[in-house]
Amino acid sequence: MWTLILKLFSVPIVRLGLWLPCLDYVPVSILDYLGFLNELLLHLDSHLSSSLLKTMLLVLLCWFFGVTGLLFILYSWFIPAVVQFNGSLALLWHDVIVQHALDTLTRSTQPQRLMKAVQKHATRGDPQSVISAIDYYCRHREWAMNIGDEKGSILDSVVSELNPEKVLELGTYCGYSTVRIARLLPPGARLITLEFNADYAAVARQVIAWAGLEDRVQLVEGASEDWIPRMKEHFGIETFDLVFLDHWKDRYLPDTKLMEDCGLLRKGTVLLADNVICPGVPDYLQYVRNSLSYRSCYFKSHLEYTKAEDGLEKSVFLG
Ligand SMILES: C[S@@+](CC[C@H](N)C(=O)[O-])C[C@H]1O[C@@H](n2cnc3c(N)ncnc32)[C@H](O)[C@@H]1O
């Protein structure tokens, strides 16, 4: 009888485990746990006669699986559905709480999990499949701070319209936007992308290589404030055609002024800035919207993989 009860509970619970984002880890521990429970109940079945004790165990099992089910609904459906309309709450839930929980549970980092999704679902040498694999993972399994599919299509249209030969990206993370930009560049064009986190840079290199775009992309490990002044001397760059700003928000304005001072902007250079509403860059917006050196416009969209407002600011340097 106990074995039957256990089987009744174990099938839905293992299925539930399969839906969890830490896919490769949770079912194993659940199966271990169920195996242990099976042993225990078989043992009790042969040694205990008290029907009261058995009823208590049954109630305990129902309570355990009820609470587990409730937590699962809250975690995978209810909270994500509620927070997706508010950018700050969405960032707090996904970027802080869920990410730290998954890091601890799976003993891996988000970039490693993203890379795994790419290896599993994307075709080598096919940038579009890399983009789709990351978008699918981030929409259905785990939010990540890539520009995402919705704002990504705005980025695509700016890149296609400009057809730039020299592009600078500030903030690589796992290389999602790098792949998006690089796949649209004309032959012979260069994309330099800056990332100061060595672990992120290592994963981004693998993602870019998986997409087959390593010959167009130069990933530079280091801080933007250190590398911007060295662009001319180190890479022989005179000016950029397009700069994509997507690093920490407090660096948008100082790095823009630094690029101006270093002469890296020419008449017609486009600055495209992500996350200008969420988390927001009020000092940068105030500068590019009020300066006579820029013609600036806003593209309304949503924070990656949510329904909270965010957008891109496109600012053309007028010299
Ligand atoms: C929002 S993520 C970039 C996302 C990426 N552009 C995409 O859409 O796939 C910001 C990244 O910028 C990096 N970063 C922040 N400040 C930086 C700086 N001053 N120099 C270089 N990298 C920086 C962070 O480590 C982080 O990986």
Image: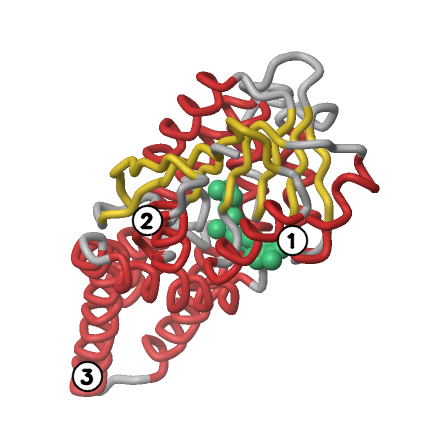
The residue to which callout 3 is attached is 56
The location of residue 57, given as percent across then percent down, is: 24, 80
Circle 3: residue type: Met
**Earlier residue among tags 2 and 3:** 2
Foreground: disc 1 or disc 3: 1
SS at mark 3? Answer: helix
Measured along the vertical axis of the image, is residue 261 above or below residue 37? above
Nearest to the eye among marks 2 and 1: give it: 1
Give percent across and percent down for residue 229. 73, 50
Instruction: Depth check: give the residue in front, 80 or 10.
Output: 80
Q: Which residue is mark 2?
A: 15
Left or right of residue 81: residue 248: right
Residue under the point 46% across and 62% down: 102
Reading the chain from its start, which is encountered first: label 1 or label 3? 3
At mark 1, the secondary structure is: helix
Provide the residue designation for mark 1.
224
Q: Please indicate whether residue 312 sits to the left or right of residue 266 in the image.
A: left
Determine whether the beta carbon of the residue marked 1 sits less than 8 angstroms from the nearest atom of ligand 1.
yes
Mark-to-mark CA distance, 1 and 3: 62 Å
Residue type, label 1 = Ser
Q: Position of residue 158 (x, y in %)?
A: 43, 25
Mark 3: few, some, or many residues within 10 Å (few <14, many ≥20)? Answer: few
Give the quarter of the figure containing the N terminus. Answer: bottom left
Front residue of 8 and 16: 16
Give the residue at x 44% y 32%. Answer: 316
